[in-house]
Amino acid sequence: MKENSKMIERLKNQLNEIESFIHKGDIHKEKISQKGTYWHIDHSLKVLEGIPEVLKNSNPQDYKPKFSFIKFMIMNTGYMPRGKGRAPKQVIPEGELSKKELLLKFEKVKTNIESLKTLEKDKTFKHPLFGWLNLNDTVKFMGIHTHHHIKIIRDILK
């Protein structure tokens, strides 16, 4: 559980950085990304909002892990290549995004991240590309994914 606590603290630190990005406004740089900073923020928040809910309601009997080379590479290097992945529909931002809306979502996400500390360790998440992840791997993935989008936002803001 100690490893999980470290990863949850990392997520909380990432959230603090995301909050600072919200206050800078929606900035676009097509050379870096076709999407603006608010899109990347909202997408990251949707992932961080949804996965803890899925974990909380997961049935450990459904867990059927199998090897995935992509999962192995990303989980062991912590690196996600840009422009290669396709997000599921439920985590793709739609319409105009406002600072107020993102700040409200941000507050909910803080609570969801905190709730990870109380989950039973046999909770699982089925990633659309990686397949089944246990709780520790899911929290690790959330950190890797969030870091990926933070790097994009940092590049847009340069």
Image: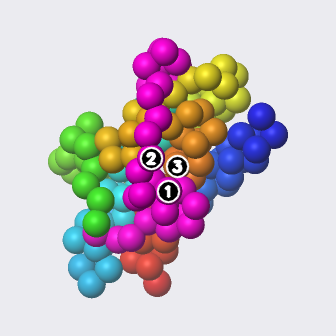
Residue 18 visible in this rendered orientation of the protein = no
Residue at 40 percent across and 33 percent down: it is 126
Secondary structure beneath label 3: helix
Q: Which residue is mark 2?
A: 67
- Measured in 3D between alpha carbons, the distance from the residue under mark 2 to the one under mark 1, in whole angstroms, is 8 Å
Residue 48 image position (x, y, % from top left): 48, 41
Numbered circles on residues, count: 3
**Gap in angstroms between the C-alphas marked 1 and 3:** 11 Å
Residue 149, image x and y in percent? 44, 62
Dot 2 crowding, Cα within 10 Å, few <14, some 14–19, many 20+: few
Does the magenta run of residues contain 73? yes
Report if the CB atoms under discs 2 and 1 are less than 8 Å apart. yes
Q: Residue at x 18, y 48 (%)?
A: 95
- For label 3, the residue is 141
- Any part of residue 61 in sight: yes
Q: Residue at x 51, y 28 (%)?
A: 124
Q: Secondary structure at mark 2?
A: loop
Looking at the rendered image, the quarter that the N terminus falls into is top right
